[in-house]
Image (cartoon, rainbow, N blue to C red):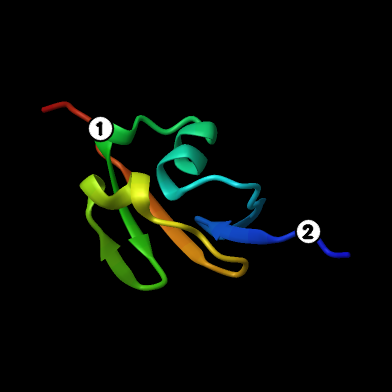
């Protein structure tokens, strides 16, 4: 049986049993400093914890950096 995956920034990642917030944090992102697009639509940060991912979903995660 094939492992279920989601695509994160162009890379296939095993899905596991996590919601979007858990998966993103497990990849090392600071959930407070990112914007997320799920399957082409903006996913509000407040809903990441309740967003259930499915095999084949695609996430684009953009980190914000400070500076001047």
Disc 1 is placed on an element classified as: helix
Q: Position of residue 61 (x, y in %)?
A: 39, 50
Disc 1 crowd, CA 10 A, few/some/many (<14, 14-19, 20+): few
Residue shown at 59% from the left, 60% from the top: 6
Is residue 4 rendered to the left or right of residue 18? right
Give how far across and how far down residue 68 sits, in percent: 11, 28
From the image, tell me which residue sits under label 2.
Answer: 3
Residue at the image point whose x is 38% and y is 55% from the top = 51
Q: Residue at x 42, y 33 (%)?
A: 29
> Which comes before the other along the chain, label 1 or label 2?
2
For this rendering, which residue is in front, 20 or 10? Answer: 20
Percent position of residue 67, x then y: 16, 26
Q: Which residue lies under the disc numbered 1?
A: 32
Q: Position of residue 63 (x, y in %)?
A: 32, 40
Direction from residue 41 to residue 1 in the image, left or right: right
For marks 1 and 2, give the CA distance.
29 Å
């Amino acid at each position: 049986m094939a492992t279920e995956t989601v695509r994160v920034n162009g890379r296939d990642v095993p899905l596991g049993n996590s919601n979007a917030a858990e998966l993103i944090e497990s990849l090392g992102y600071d959930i407070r400093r990112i914007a997320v697009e799920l399957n082409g639509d903006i996913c509000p940060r407040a809903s990441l914890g309740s967003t259930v991912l499915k095999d084949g979903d695609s996430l684009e995660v953009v980190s914000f950096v400070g500076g001047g």
